[in-house]
Amino acid sequence: MLMNYKRIIQIVLLMAVLVLSTYLFKQADTYTSSAAFCNSCHVHNHAQLSWEGSTHYIESEEELSCVSCHLPPKGEGFYREKIKRGFKDVYAYYFKDSVDHNWELKSRPEQAREHTFKASCLECHPKLFPIQLSPNGEIAHWHYQQHETDMHCIDCHLNVGHGPGGKASHNFELLNTTIKTDTLYLVSAQIRDLKSFTETIPQSSIGFDMIAIEKGDSSFFIGKAEVSWDEYLLFLRETESEGRSENEIDGFSGATPPWGNPDQGWGMGSRPAITMTHHAASMYCKWLSVRTGKSYRLPTEAEWEYVARQVITTESELVNTINSDKTKTIEPQEVSPDVLGLHHLFGNVKEFCADEFEKGSKEHVLKGGSFKSEKTNYRADYREATQHDHWMKTDPQIPKSIWWYSDCNDVGFRLVLTYQNTEKP
């Protein structure tokens, strides 16, 4: 009889321990899953502030925390991932300086994919076509269904967790952007000899510098900097407002609105225009030629390399002329000009050339590297190819845009103009 009492007491104590352990585990799990706990280790206040300004925080019907997005759902590796990331975060907290962390770099889509679980997105949003979904949303979600294995929710909704906005849609406001200035050019520049000059676009406030490159009978001018947003927006505004079609006599059409924000929120002005396709860059050159009465075009690969070989003298001089910010584009004046007076021939945005990457290929040559590139890519002979289909992966439109890349933010272009020597016999 005494043995039965002991057994009962042991069972009761064991159950009490199990209940207490379960309770303590749940309490610990709840505490370590809170935003306050996450932020006690992840010492980047801007993440908390941007979270509180996001649509997930403001519009969500249930209370969410960091783990809602940054860990997989429970039953799908939640605790395994939590332990793994916990050890990693504790190590970083005690042995690394948070000041050295490049938070902007970590917020890029390719980085964000590694820290956000698609399964968690679908856990909260199992219905891809709710009643309140906008027409743009229906198009985008249908596109996602067709390419589910290749796409992540944050490809289109990068800012829903951190920052305002976050809904993918056509950006009609971009094409209506105006540039206020007191300057108005009446005529384009006149070229009398092989000297650098400032081009002016008639009936606009836009001017840009062209640098003379001497090369015997093949001399030419090349843009001092990549085509800026100020310059490119004039093209967008004029061609879109006139509603031209590609079959009309002018030979160029108005660009369709981009899907999202092509400047990535970095700003416009004199920063290089980005995310346009090779076709769009070529049509810009055609439009500019009509507006100025000259024959602007994209450089050939040989012309670009010819300039680059004159620019690269020593590695130390090259360092002073490139964009050292590995997170975004910068304005021309933020670096020193090179020996020819050019800005950012290397390392701000990759630059389109006119050449096909391979004969018969739909891809074109890119030169110069971008802010994302390794220093080993800053060479005259280094070449890359456009990746048209890959850079259009998240564009849900049918047919896809011929004007804008949806998944590329480090490609732009520089102008070239052949020098016509009027003194030749």
Image (spheres, rainbow, N blue to C red):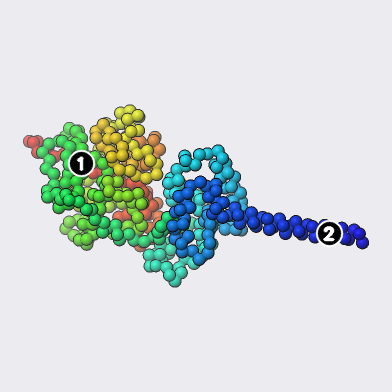
User: Which residue type carries mark 2?
Assistant: Ile
The total of numbered circles placed on residues is 2
Looking at this view, name the residue that lies furthest to the bottom: 131
Quadrant position of residue 366: top left
Left or right: 132 as drawn, with respect to 276: right
Residue at x-position 58% and y-position 47%: 86
Residue at x-position 64% and y-position 56%: 27
Q: Quadrant of the C terminus?
A: top left
Counting from the top left corner in percent of width and height, residue 254 is at 24, 58
Circle 1 SS class: strand
Counting from the top left corner in percent of width and height, residue 394 is at 40, 56
Q: Quadrant of the N terminus?
A: bottom right
Counting from the top left corner in percent of width and height, residue 52 is at 46, 57
Circle 2 SS class: helix
Judging depth in this view, the residue of 202 and 287 nearest the camera is 202
Q: Which residue is mark 2?
A: 9
Q: In the rendered image, is residue 89 in sight?
A: yes
Instruction: State how far apart marks 2 and 1 are (Cα).
Output: 90 Å
Judging depth in this view, the residue of 301 and 171 nearest the camera is 171
Quadrant position of residue 301: top left
Counting from the top left corner in percent of width and height, residue 362 is at 32, 50
